[in-house]
């Protein structure tokens, strides 16, 4: 049974704060840390490493696609949600065993990146980055499911805020800490491979925080049960083989489909869509030929989707649109942010201290405030506030692009942007958690969080090319405009379903 919290209400600021002292909530600080470390090792820290190694700006931002695994994790989420790992599941439980395996894979991928010099070729680094994206996304699937299952839905806003705090601290270590280490072991304005290699090896060791946490925490009670249709070893093996066939089919389709459309972003979107359809077609064929247990496929892939639309009816489509676009302006800007700071003349230490360290502290403050405000005023009201602030603060980057190297202005822009991002993220994660059914936790949350990042990250991969074409000021204006449809969607949902704001 999930641990109860002795709070009669969360209507006062004091009671809202006390929830953060709960043991279950505090656990999310360390799991969030484990989830936050890999992210910047794919994004901003890696982008500075590649840029310093002489890689072109557009190629640098293409590397953000290595994190598209986060956007397709719903494909293998059912495997992790329903299938126990041999031996480990009996020792640790289903959630903890998968979590431990994912964390070991994350450490291995970071080590592989450390052993690859991008100045001598990008293929090895690309493979390592994709492996890190896959293993990190797998870790996120398990942590999200654990967070939702371990405690009641009433306290998900606090769990989300604490998770974000840990996540941001992990990002702080991998981002600011990574740049400090690279600067300490290297020479400013000179590429030293050994400096980055040592930095990434240290980051791999830092992931031991997550491993220790996994070994110490308890398993959610509902994961002590076995699903009846998983008792047949043959079904288990064939289901895993189906997943591998789906992955192979998707990769084949993505490498085969290329229409050379005039708009590169549309071309990639078409390739992804057709590859996904081909992968689903392979799954359908295996089921039709009775190679795979139909009941298993229905329970793991079909039923969670049907449940969502059954519960929310006509509003489900608008909810999915909100999920898919809520973070578009922040993610698209974030992909190129460190390259922007470097182009403005800021050093690695200045970027680490102001843009990352100070910025993440502001995000933590915004996350805690957002968590408490969400409990007091409701998720939808804070979602709306976060959407408005996110669009407005993106405009501040235009001032920085005009002024250039100005540490005071950079500090102001970073404070405003990260405060609003933290507030919005706390409300948004609580919103996603509230949409899931406890019977399909990992699958439904994986689908929602995948949808949350798919379009933004796909578009973000072209941010370097867009800046080359339109310049930084016009690019930042575009990211602010991208946030306007989100505001209208939230207002529409509030008016259509007034109960959502309670």
Image (tube, helix red, strand yellow):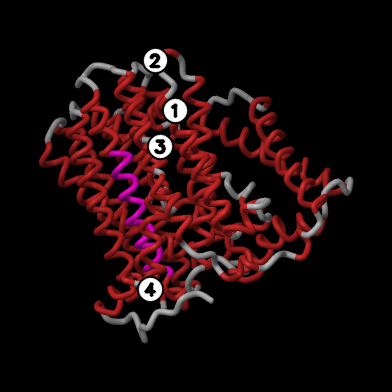
Q: Is residue 10 above or below residue 344?
A: below
* Residue 260 x/y as whole percent: 59, 23
Query: For this view, does 184 lie left or right of residue 275?
Result: left
Q: In the depicted view, which residue is nearer to us: 211 or 256?
A: 211
Q: Residue furthest right?
A: 289
Q: Nearer the viewer, mark 2 or mark 3?
A: 3
> Mark 4 to mark 1: distance in Å?
42 Å
Query: Which disc number belongs to residue 119?
Result: 2
> Mark 3 to mark 4: distance in Å?
39 Å
Query: Which disc number belongs to residue 113?
Result: 1
Mark 1 vs 2, N-terminal side: 1
Name the residue located 45 percent from the left edge and 59 percent from the top edge.
Answer: 216
Q: In the depicted view, which residue is nearer to us: 317 or 40?
A: 40
Q: Quadrant of residue 12?
A: bottom left
- Mark 1 neighbour density, 10 Å: few (under 14) some (14–19) many (20 or more): many
- Mark 4 neighbour density, 10 Å: few (under 14) some (14–19) many (20 or more): some
Mark 4 vs 1, N-terminal side: 1
Query: Which disc number belongs to residue 286?
Result: none
> Mark 1 to mark 2: distance in Å?
13 Å
Query: Which disc number belongs to residue 204?
Result: 3
Q: Write down the region rendered in magenta.
A: 156-175
Q: Nearer the viewer, mark 1 or mark 2?
A: 1
Q: Quadrant of the C terminus?
A: bottom left
Residue 380 visible in the current orientation: no
- Mark 2 neighbour density, 10 Å: few (under 14) some (14–19) many (20 or more): some
* Residue 166 x/y as whole percent: 34, 54
Mark 2 element type? helix
Query: Which disc number belongs to residue 378?
Result: 4
């Amino acid at each position: 049974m999930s641990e109860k919290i002795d709070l009669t209400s969360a209507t006062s600021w004091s009671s809202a704060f006390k929830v953060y002292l709960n043991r279950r909530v505090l656990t999310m600080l360390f799991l969030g840390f484990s989830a936050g470390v890999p992210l910047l090792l794919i994004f901003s820290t890696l982008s500075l490493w590649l840029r310093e190694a002489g890689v072109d700006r557009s190629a640098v931002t293409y590397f953000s696609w290595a994190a598209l695994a986060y956007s397709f994790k719903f494909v293998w989420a059912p495997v992790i949600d329903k299938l126990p790992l041999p031996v480990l599941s009996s020792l640790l439980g289903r959630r903890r065993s998968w979590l431990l395996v994912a964390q070991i894979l994350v450490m291995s991928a970071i080590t592989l990146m450390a052993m690859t010099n991008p100045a001598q070729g990008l293929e090895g680094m690309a493979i390592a980055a994709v492996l890190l994206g896959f293993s990190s996304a797998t870790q996120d699937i398990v942590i999200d499911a654990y967070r939702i299952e371990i405690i009641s839905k009433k306290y998900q806003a606090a769990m989300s805020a604490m998770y974000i705090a840990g996540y941001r601290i992990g990002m702080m270590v991998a981002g600011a800490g990574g740049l400090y280490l690279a600067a300490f072991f290297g020479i400013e304005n000179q590429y030293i491979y050994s400096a980055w290699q040592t930095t990434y090896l240290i980051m791999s060791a830092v992931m031991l925080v997550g491993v220790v946490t996994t070994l110490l925490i308890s398993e959610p009670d509902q994961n002590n049960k076995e699903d009846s249709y998983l008792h047949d070893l043959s079904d288990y093996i064939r289901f895993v083989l189906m997943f591998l066939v789906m992955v192979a089919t998707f990769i084949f389709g993505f490498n085969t489909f290329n229409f050379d459309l005039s708009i590169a972003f549309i071309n990639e979107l078409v390739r992804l869509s057709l590859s996904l359809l081909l992968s689903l077609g392979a799954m359908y064929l295996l089921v039709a030929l009775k190679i795979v247990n139909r009941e298993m496929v229905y329970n793991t892939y079909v039923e969670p989707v049907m449940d969502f639309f059954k519960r929310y009816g006509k509003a489900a489509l608008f909810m999915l649109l909100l999920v898919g676009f809520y973070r578009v302006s922040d993610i698209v800007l974030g992909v190129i942010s460190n390259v922007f700071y470097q182009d403005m003349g800021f050093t690695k230490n200045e970027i680490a201290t102001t843009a990352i360290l100070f910025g993440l502290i502001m995000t933590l403050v915004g996350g805690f405030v957002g968590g408490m405000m969400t409990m007091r005023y409701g998720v939808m009201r804070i979602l709306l506030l976060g959407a408005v602030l996110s669009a407005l603060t993106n405009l501040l980057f235009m001032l920085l692009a005009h002024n250039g190297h100005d540490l005071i202005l950079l500090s102001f822009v970073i404070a405003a942007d990260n405060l609003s991002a933290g507030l919005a993220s706390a409300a948004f994660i609580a919103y996603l958690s509230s949409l899931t059914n406890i019977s399909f936790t990992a699958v439904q949350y994986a689908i929602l969080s995948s949808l949350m990042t798919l379009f933004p990250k796909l578009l973000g991969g072209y941010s370097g090319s867009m800046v080359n074409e339109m310049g930084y000021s016009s690019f930042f204006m575009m990211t602010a405009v991208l946030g306007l449809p989100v505001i209208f969607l939230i207002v529409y949902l509030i008016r259509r379903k007034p109960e959502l704001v309670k």
